[in-house]
Image: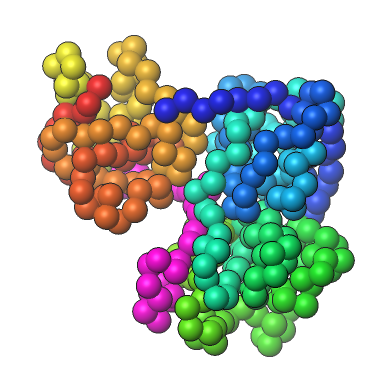
Amino acid sequence: MTTATLTVIVSRKWQEAQDICGFEFISEDGSPLLPFSAGSHVDVHLPGGLIRQYSLCNNPDKTNHYQIAVLRDANGRGGSAAIHDLVKEGDRIKISEPKNHFPLAHNAPHHLLLAGGIGITPILCMAERLTAIGDEFEMHYCSRTPERMAFTSRIQASPFNDKVAFHFDTGDQAQKFDIEATLANTQAGTHLYVCGPRGFMDAVLDAARRQKWEEARLHYEFFGAVIERPASDTTFKVRLASSGVTLDVPPECTVIEVLAASGIEVPTSCEQGVCGTCLTRVIDGEPDHRDSYLTDDERATGDQFLPCCSRAKTPYLVLDL
Ligand code: FES
């Protein structure tokens, strides 16, 4: 899968909160950028050849610019450090067209927006959109400390400020986020949207499933996912259907790395199992899915997998390559 890219100018870069930088992009000739829907992200091509996905967080009614915000991740794989340290105002960089894997369900009677930390970016965009179209919503924004909370002034100056509850890990017990109570006190048919660190998202989704929310009302997007590499991983083989070439995938390598070492290029972007770019058809064998992209039904079917992170449960996989 290839995605069209465009060159944009970094028109503004600012410190939005502790360890969080905001970036604004405009087109080279000042013309409007492509319209986007709330929940969209763009792939950003970073210095050093990395490509990372960032949610657009400006009001989707405004297409004279795009905004993103990035948390510096000290334990990350270099993407957040590259954009924090190397991208400056006035730079020209490449981004993809906006893509949306996290859209609003516009037929929902009510929306519950939950943001943890930097997960505020798509959630803020959703709040802007729901306000513009007059849909009912409630929003909870959780952060470790007030200093780490981005976009507080923007939210406080917005027409939806009274719909937002702020929660901190620090501070008194009364303001802390009570997942179970929040989920239990919503009106029937509410749709839930959650974005944030993996632990936050897992806690919210686990609670929703315990409370028997239908999957169709749960909307989420994992970015910066941590791919598990358990010590129990073993070597397996991949066979390419077109040529019959068979390659060993040792525990320390991904399928993508093994293919690349043999000159077989599969397009990649996130390399974290979140974007779907490397989606590959599986003709035989059973994948061991490690991604956050496929639905449970797609995983169960077993005829496709994400070779940037997923492995095999069977001794070999035959790939449609
Ligand atoms: Fe993004 Fe594999 S490259 S899912």
- 97 relative to 271 in the view: left or right: right
Give above or below for 117 relative to 254: below
Image quarter for ligand 1 equals: top left
Tell me which residue sits at (79%, 72%) in the image. 161
Give above or below for 34 relative to 47: below
From the image, which quarter does the N terminus lie in?
A: top left
**254 and 181: which is toward the camera:** 181
The image position of residue 44, as x and y in percent, is 63, 32
Give above or below for 216 relative to 42: below
Scheme by which the image is coloured: rainbow
The image position of residue 155, as x and y in percent, is 80, 65
| Residue 301 magenta-highlighted | no
Q: Quarter of the image holding residue 78?
A: top right
Tell me which residue sits at (73%, 63%) in the image. 132
The image position of residue 279, as x and y in percent, is 35, 35
Tell me which residue sits at (84%, 37%) in the image. 12
- 168 relative to 100 in the view: left or right: right
Q: Quarter of the image holding residue 278?
A: top left
Q: Which residues are magenta?
A: 206-232
- 200 relative to 174 in the view: left or right: left
| Residue 226 magenta-highlighted | yes
Tell me which residue sits at (76%, 58%) in the image. 150
The answer to whether one can see residue 168 in this image is no
Give above or below for 187 relative to 55: below
The image position of residue 145, as x and y in percent, is 73, 66
The answer to whether one can see residue 49 in this image is yes
From the image, which quarter does the C terminus lie in?
A: top left
